[in-house]
Amino acid sequence: MEKHKEKESNPSQVKDTEMLNCLMQKLTSKNFLEEKETKNRFYLVENKDVKITKLKEHGHSASLNDNLSPLQYERIKYKPTLPKALASEYQILDEDFGDEFINKKEYEEIKKFFKSIDGLPMINVKETKNNELFKGGNVLKIGIILSGGPAPGGHNVISGIYDYAKRYNEESQVIGFLGGIDGLYNKNYVTITDNLMNKFRNLGGFNMLWSGRGKVRNKDDLLAIENIVLKLKLNGLVIIGGDGSNSNAALIAEYLKERNIPISVIGVPKTIDGDLKSEAIEISFGFDTATRTYSEIIGNLCTDVKTGNNVYHVVRVMGRSASHVVLECALQTRPNVVLIGEEVERDKIPLKTIVNNIVNIILKRHDLNKNYGVILLPEGLIEFIPEMKILIEELNVILKTSSPSEPFDASKLKESKELWNFLPQIIRDQLLLDRESTEPSKIKESDWGCRSNQFGSFYNKLYADNDINEKRSEIFSLAHEYYNDEHDHSFSIYTNDEKQDQIKNKRKFSLRKEIRNNKEIVKHLKKCPLFLK
């Protein structure tokens, strides 16, 4: 692909550009790099003065002429420790039908859709004391797909498969389909080599093969996969992904088994959410790194709120349909409030109760002179609130049968009208805006979450509509600001009126002092429409 450059209108600029290009070519030339390879510095060209500046190399940053940092190069050298059962040259494969690993009640429902692969044995890999060197086997050809969101460990799965295939037979091939399952449909793949594999060992991300969120949609897709498998003569197909990706793997395995095509289809459980768990799968890779990283940040916030005081941080962590991540983070960091989606669903807790519980905790902590805290919730909390599911279902029906040009008629809501009236306008607008993202199976907490300035617009409008006393509204605002210190995810209230802003700024110090010393003022928080019982 040719790159087109715009012509410089100024001759001096052209000359400078030519000099810079010449210098950069020199800096990135092979001879130059070899000369400077042993030195602990790299060179930077400054456009303004057209000169070379020597800079010390940073251990966490790649130099101008490289894609990886020194730290990443050291990471590539690391050799993961294998379980004893996999570390030896030979393994014992024990066939077991896995009755102790199966939830029989759920399995009875699932096996109706997978009649061909139902009854296949579970293979247990056991350690052997055979120390003989492996003499080699047949040539293997294995296809690999990275699917869904990236998680640390994906490249290690690929390297493990690649190393085993090459050890099994040096002529074996490992093919990586690019961009997820869509790469399989489009026959878009790359043959993995030592050189390619060594660039990604022990490194995070899914960028070696890229990822995708394609699905097996119909019989035509399965037929296309069959043709590609036969054309490439694959012995195995490994799909690395979460619940959706492993559902794809199961559908493909069922179809190919039904067609008597000799191939092993393997689904590798990968999900940061940690919702692919069973007696046979203790944990999916990605979960540990995610919770460790989250917990480090949340722990820092816990220290920060105590240092700054008068601040509440509301932290949403990953977990659209499961609360494993938020629960693990809570166990590691001990926040003041944690919401578990499954408990909300089990106990059928309404949204108002959730909000009121949070407010009550804030008020109790205020009585203890602890005007700070951290609140954790999963991003998919809204999916677990029963009344929200009903509201979304009603909205889907109403909007499907009404004209897009017509304004939404809330009177058509039957069971969820009260909840609709309770929600701020900005949240209502979001629910009406994009129907695809608000289906019960897809809606996320982020679809109705909003920042403090958006809450401010809502409250200002509400105060004006209800003719609330100006001073009381001002105290209200400062009470929220006192607690939250204007942090991005706080429920702070702002006013758009310049005069009111000036008044507020002049009285800020005195009112803050008044709030601090008068507990009764804090009770105004309960008057806030969002916190109504």
Image (cartoon, rainbow, N blue to C red):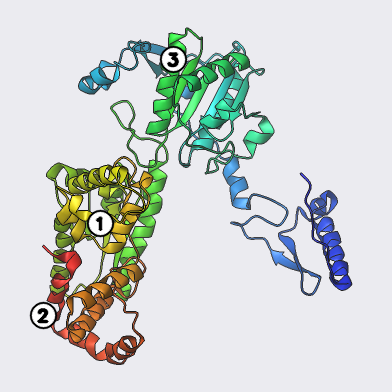
- Position of 129 relative to 292 (above/below): above
| Measured Cα–Cα span from mark 1 to mark 3 | 47 Å
| Measured Cα–Cα span from mark 2 to mark 3 | 68 Å
The amino acid type of the residue labelled 1 equals Arg
Mark 2 crowd level (few <14, some 14–19, many ≥20, 10 Å Cα): few
Q: Which residue is mark 2?
A: 520
Label whose residue precedes the other's in the sequence (2 or 3): 3
The amino acid type of the residue labelled 3 equals Tyr
Q: Which residue is mark 1?
A: 334
Residue at figure coordinates x 75%, y 58% from the top left:
39
Left or right of 524? Residue 197 is right
Residue at figure coordinates x 70%, y 66% from the top left:
55
Say which quarter of the image contains residue 418.
Answer: bottom left
On the rendered image, what quadrant is the N terminus found in?
A: top right
Label whose residue precedes the other's in the sequence (1 or 3): 3
Give the percent coordinates (x, y) of residue 477. 25, 78
Of 365 and 131, nearer the camera is: 365
Residue 255 - label = 3
| Measured Cα–Cα span from mark 1 to mark 2 | 29 Å
Proximity of marks 2 and 3: CB atoms separated by less than 8 Å: no
